[in-house]
Image (tube, grey):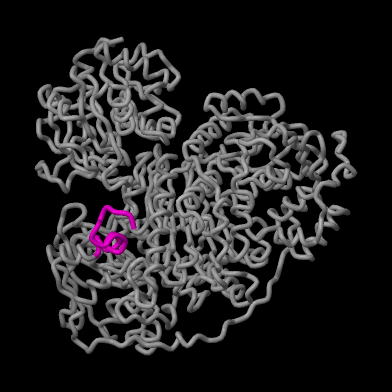
Amino acid sequence: MKIGVVVFPGSNCDHDAFYAFHDVLQQPVEFIWHQSQDLSGFDVVVLPGGFSYGDYLRTGAIARFSPVMRAIEQFARAGGPVLGICNGFQILCEAGLLPGALMRNTGLRFICRHVRVSVETTATPFTSAARAGQVLRMPIAHAEGSYFCDAETLAELKRNDQIVFRYCAPDGRRDPAANPNGSLEAIAGVTNREHNVVGLMPHPERAVEASLGSTDGLVVLRSLIETLERQPAAVS
Amino acid sequence: MPPTPPTPSTQSVVDAEIKMTPHLASEHGLTPDEYARIQKILGRDPTITELGVFSVMWSEHCSYKSSRVHLKRLPTRAPQVLQGPGENAGVVDVGDGWAAAFKMESHNHPSYVEPFQGAATGVGGILRDVFTMGARPIAVLDSLRFGPIADTPGVPPEAVARNRRLLDGIIQGIAFYGNCFGVPTVGGEIAFEPGYAGNPLVNVLALGVAPKNQLFLARATGEGNPVIYVGSKTGRDGIHGASLLASAEFTEESQQKRPNVQVGDPFLEKLLLEACLEVMATGAVVGIQDMGAAGLTSTSCEMAARGRVGIEMELDRVPQRETGMTPYEMMLSESQERMLLVAQRGREQEVFSVFRKWGLDAVEIGCVTSDGMLRVLHHGRVAAEIPAAALADQAPVYERPMAHPPRSPATDVRVPLAPPRSDLTANFHKLLAAPAIASKRWIFQQYDHMVRTNTLAIPGAADAAVVRLKGTQRALALASDGNGRWCSLDPRSGAMHAVAEAARNVAAVGARPWAATNCLNFGNPEKPEVMWQFSEAVDGIAEACRALSIPITGGNVSFYNDTLGKSIDPTPILGVLGLLEDASRMVQTAFRAEGDVILLLDGRGDAAPTTPDEHAAAREFPSSEYSRTIAGVVGGVPPAIDLAAEARLIEALVALAKESLLASAHDLSDGGIAVALAECGFLAAGLGTDLAAGVNLAGALPAELALFGEDGARAVVSTPESSLARLRDLAAQCQVGAQVIGVVTRGELRIAYNGDTVIRDSSAALRAAWSGAIEQALFGDHPSGQP
């Protein structure tokens, strides 16, 4: 089993994701340079947070055209698990691998703080170890995390069980005050129709040790590892 | 003009196109004496390019010509110091083979002229100073000063509105740069005083770490070695930006200098960081320096001077953003995100390939020579030829006249006090909502303070920021502090307090103060009173650092913080780095458990007089935040400082943390013991437990002085009953008083003084006043708007 963490030149959570897998969970992990088109040997691809190519235009708007994204698209279409965190989520939406878009936060400001999200579906490789409705405490750190999609897409997301995380109060209730960025229906993470690609705004890799304030991100990362252990063959 | 052959001879230097006049020199900020000195060094009139080069290198900002004689008095040596002042950042040994590089710098004037970009490039500049040493930046702190942002009697509403806009723009600029670059902004401090309305302060501290044996210096050596330009292209932006903006007073025309402010590109800086660290790892780099103030000029001549060599450059090779740039413009451009490095001859390709990988320009623009000259060629013609050492090290040094300002009548003001046994709860609400004391959450939430997953104490959660050193048990603590109000009343005492408070903050998390950097913000040094303030402050810093055994490893002086002739309060900011050998012993501010015992630690211990000097306390009280906010009185004198007591308290805090005897610790500063106790509860509430203090205090002073006085060398700590005996033993060994004053309760803060309850309210109500005050001041009832 091998985990790949993509490095765009402006990725800045790449080392954090690497550390979480390598040092905390002691899993084999390697970086994938954004110019690379070869994902052979990787069982899962993680697109980390950051500012891929500066993101001055629109988050992920340039990254979606990078060489590595062509390879990731094939990898995803073949059923390979792909996780997009924060900027990674934004890129996956831009690339059309996930439905919807991420807009400026309603307050028009960058927000960095711990939030709580409820697990809305366990039918993904990244939430399979969670309980449905489980509340996870993880940090967000973004200026463009307000999830949006049209009504038709939203209906489809619901029909296909594609909403993965929602912002919520500590007890799991939906509460407008707990929605930090104005996301539609408090959506914090979604999956594709096939459920192998997941994007979320919160940072599970920042919630992997008690000394960092939370270990709830391990639920996401461990789900992945358990899924892979059940299906050991590399996809590509 | 016919082309001149590229022979480096002084003959060809003479530039016939622009006639040199004393007036031109004066327009460049050079005095007649300085101009004469230039003529003497060169043995002729300078060319226009040379004049520009001298003017920036000899500017106050780059040359420290007014401060140098004083800065010599600071203590800079200690066994842990690997690199003291003089390089791009100070470096200390932090154990397990690691070194920490850190430095603080101001970007005051640019941030006033153009808040967003001014603050952003301030962050960019100090980050480069750190990674040019080979250290990866792991933390940033900001010390900020603004005019009032709350409606204030006597301050025109439009001035308050401008302060709000400045605050908003500066915060967003810092966030923009640090967040994209990927360095956590983990702390700092902020204060609001009318004196900063026309001249806000933006001081940025950056910390980086590197393996001790992989540090780099900004030194050119080895004749014939290539000089390589890397990073962003050179444009006309920022000509005379930091160097000259920071070397003259502000006038009404200063807003016209907006185009002189540089524009930051944090993405490019991120590429530059990665490429620089990668190229350093190849072993092909001899020396490297970032291009900050005075751009290519300072980089080339400083690297040459430090290595006692010369550098020759052909400007045609410099990557340029625009066409037709003159040598003058290229040498003075302060375009951001550029570095100059000297590589080993024969290994240039290794350097180029790394920069190509990161999509950055890397061009050989010259070489190291042995003649000690900075020689600048343009189209093969010599545009400047100056002894590098003359530029870097032989700038004029001034012993400017100093004068003790006349004794201020403010010294004698007194605060009208409430009658004995009064309920002070209403006043306390107001004090908690003062912007200086209120929660800074609205600010630090705009900063990514967690990236790199090293942040053990998020902003506001502990007295100092704490970042761990992955791969070791260690963590580094950082605090920056300064009190302009106190320094304006007594610069020496105020500066000592700044050192003591920063050191105390670091110790409160359990870290041993290890080294310090500073950023000295003052008015126009040509005013004798300002120079006196500066000299006094330097003496205060020196005395306090000696008493607390903290070496100064570098810093920055920002003079000319004057607008329309009025100087700011003298504001020395101290950044203290602390070392925590076992990160798991870190102590934070929040109470941890109901029933824990609350103690007041006092460094004066048994030496504290049993009957306090009520007269002295009344003289000091007008300098407190309570006096300003509740009584509207500002004056008096800073609290008397007792450095020996500070040193004992620091020892005690470190020793207690080491034995894990503290559930929480919080030093006493703005707002005194009452505010400190409340904050310990507020922060616990933030973690989901509604804890508060139930405290009985006793003493001979009037209640307000006892509750809100800001004497140093004190901290409130809490501990489980089971640790109490050991805690008191250890405190006694350190000769620190440890008086039990109450217990951690739930739901309600209650403070009694001499048996009367003087503050009592639900912790939720108090917390609401404290937590929303900054947003309320900025936006009123429109919490997500723009000021």
Q: How many marks?
A: 0
In the displayed structure, B546 sits above or below B318; it is: below
* Magenta-colored stretch includes residue A2: no
Nearest the camera: B654 or B110?
B110
Q: Residue at x 43, y 49 (%)?
A: B173
Horizontally, is B85 left or right of A109 in the view? right
Nearest the camera: A222 or B520?
B520
- Where residue B782 appears, as percent x and y from the top left, is 24, 57
Image quarter in which the N terminus of chain B is found: top right
Residue B708 visible in the snapshot? yes
Horizontally, is B765 left or right of B182 in the view? left
Horizontally, is B604 left or right of B498 in the view? left
Q: Residue at x 76, y 59 (%)?
A: B25
Image quarter in which the C terminus of chain B is found: bottom left
Which quadrant holds residue B535? bottom right
Residue A129 visible in the snapshot? no
- Where residue B127 appears, as percent x and y from the top left, is 51, 45
Residue furthest out toward the right? B11
Which quadrant holds residue B400? bottom right
* Magenta-colored stretch includes residue B782: yes
- Where residue A91 appears, as percent x and y from the top left, is 33, 27
Nearest the camera: A45 or A24?
A45
Nearest the camera: B650 or B85?
B85
Q: Residue at x 59, y 45 (%)?
A: B237
> What stretch of residues is rendered in magenta?
B770-787
Which quadrant holds residue A115? top left
In the displayed structure, B321 sits above or below B63; it is: above
- Where residue B675 appears, as percent x and y from the top left, is 27, 69
